Image: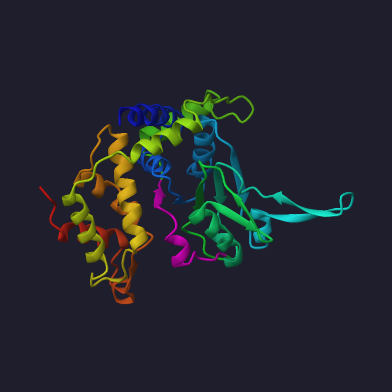
């Protein structure tokens, strides 16, 4: 696991030196990258969500695609379409922006459900079907979608089936005082200048794929399997929760916990790894009952309650 720890340590250090004040967000994003999962970033405007994803792509030397989602966007704008060639009198597939390594779906809740659903096959099967022709996506393929939690006019909330395909939902907040001061100093020094900022890659896509392959060697004891299973099953019976974690959630939870353990340099999973990723794995999957929402109970409180109900293995 030392190879994984070294590789992701370099990426983490480079990202945190450029994106200040978002260390927890970066840690969770790298967990999803290693675990081969997709991420939903939620935060108010101006908190560097887009900059974070673009910077990560540059530091990996990976292909980057960006879709600015709007209400009038069609699925073909994402996937691509068949184009008729008058010279050859044949149809050829013009690939859309989804054929990349790291895809930023900016403001995903601003586009219609029909267009949102265009991402489902790509996110689950890593392939795209256009007019009956199926094309494989890049091995590194990862979707990072963003959404704004404060503006609801003209938005289309993601359905549960779409949300469940995101491994993690990461909340992006405001930077603390010292971090924001450093951000201002960096800006004054020209660090964020669009014309002059040149970011060197600190890892290669092949290294990420190699790390993903090594992650399969990480050991998981029966006690951890039982702990995770008890948490998932208990989430479905909480009095405050109408819809608990799905089987896909348990798989995502285990994969994320393994990735976190490997990034820390261990070849085994501990209960602390399970707890570290509990909130980003569950916060978009647990649906509260109307009664609990009226009482002011939040998803964060429900997850904390869940973690307190299940005994930690020794």
> Of 223 and 279, which appears nearest the observer?
223
Rendered position, 18 above or below 31: above
Q: Is residue 163 visible?
A: yes
Left or right, 214 with respect to 239, comes to: right
| Image quadrant in which you'd find residue 133 | bottom right
Rendered position, 227 above or below 16: below
Q: Position of residue 131 (x, y in %)?
A: 69, 61
Q: Quadrant of the N terminus?
A: top left
Q: Position of residue 153 (x, y in %)?
A: 56, 66
> Of 219 and 244, which appears nearest the observer?
219
Q: Residue furthest bottom?
A: 291
> Of 163 and 154, which appears nearest the observer?
163
Segment colored magenta: 155-173
Residue drawn at the location 20% of the way across and 50% of the way down: 224
Q: Position of residue 134 (x, y in %)?
A: 62, 55
Rendered position, 222 above or below 237: above
Left or right, 124 with respect to 115, comes to: left
Q: Residue furthest left?
A: 314
158 inside magenta stretch: yes
Q: Is residue 22 visible?
A: no
> Of 268 and 305, which appears nearest the observer?
268
Residue drawn at the location 42% of the way across and 33% of the way down: 210
Residue drawn at the location 49% of the way across and 27% of the way down: 186
Residue drawn at the location 28% of the way across and 66% of the way down: 297
Q: Position of residue 87 (x, y in %)?
A: 89, 49
Left or right, 280 with respect to 41, comes to: left
């Amino acid at each position: 696991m030392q190879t994984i720890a070294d590789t992701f340590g370099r990426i983490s250090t480079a990202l945190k030196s450029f994106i200040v004040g978002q260390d927890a967000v970066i840690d969770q994003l790298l967990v999803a990258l290693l675990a081969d999962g997709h991420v939903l970033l939620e935060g108010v405007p101006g908190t560097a969500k887009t900059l974070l994803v673009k910077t990560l792509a540059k530091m990996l030397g990976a292909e980057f695609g960006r879709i600015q989602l709007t209400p009038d966007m069609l699925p073909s704008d994402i996937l691509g379409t068949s184009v008729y060639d008058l010279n050859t009198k044949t149809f050829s597939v013009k690939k859309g922006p989804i054929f990349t390594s790291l895809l930023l779906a900016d403001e995903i809740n601003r586009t219609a459900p029909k267009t949102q659903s265009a991402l489902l096959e790509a996110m689950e099967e890593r392939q795209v079907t256009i007019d009956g022709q199926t094309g494989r996506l890049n091995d590194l393929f990862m979707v990072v979608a963003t959404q704004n939690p404060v503006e609801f006019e003209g938005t289309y909330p993601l359905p549960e089936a779409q949300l469940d395909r995101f491994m993690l939902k990461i909340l992006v907040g405001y930077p603390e005082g010292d971090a924001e001061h450093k951000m201002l100093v960096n800006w004054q020094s020209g660090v964020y200048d669009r014309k002059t900022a040149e970011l060197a890659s600190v890892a290669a896509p092949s290294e990420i794929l190699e790390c993903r392959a090594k992650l399969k060697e990480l050991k998981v004891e029966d006690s951890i399997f039982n702990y995770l299973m008890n948490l998932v099953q208990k989430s479905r019976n909480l009095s405050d929760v109408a819809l608990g974690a799905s089987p896909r959630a348990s798989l995502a939870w285990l994969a994320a916990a393994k990735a976190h353990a490997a990034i820390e340099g261990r070849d085994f999973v501990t209960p602390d790894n399970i707890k570290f990723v509990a909130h980003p794995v569950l916060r978009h999957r647990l649906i509260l009952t109307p009664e609990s929402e009226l009482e002011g109970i939040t998803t964060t409180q429900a997850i904390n309650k869940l973690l307190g109900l299940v005994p930690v293995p020794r």
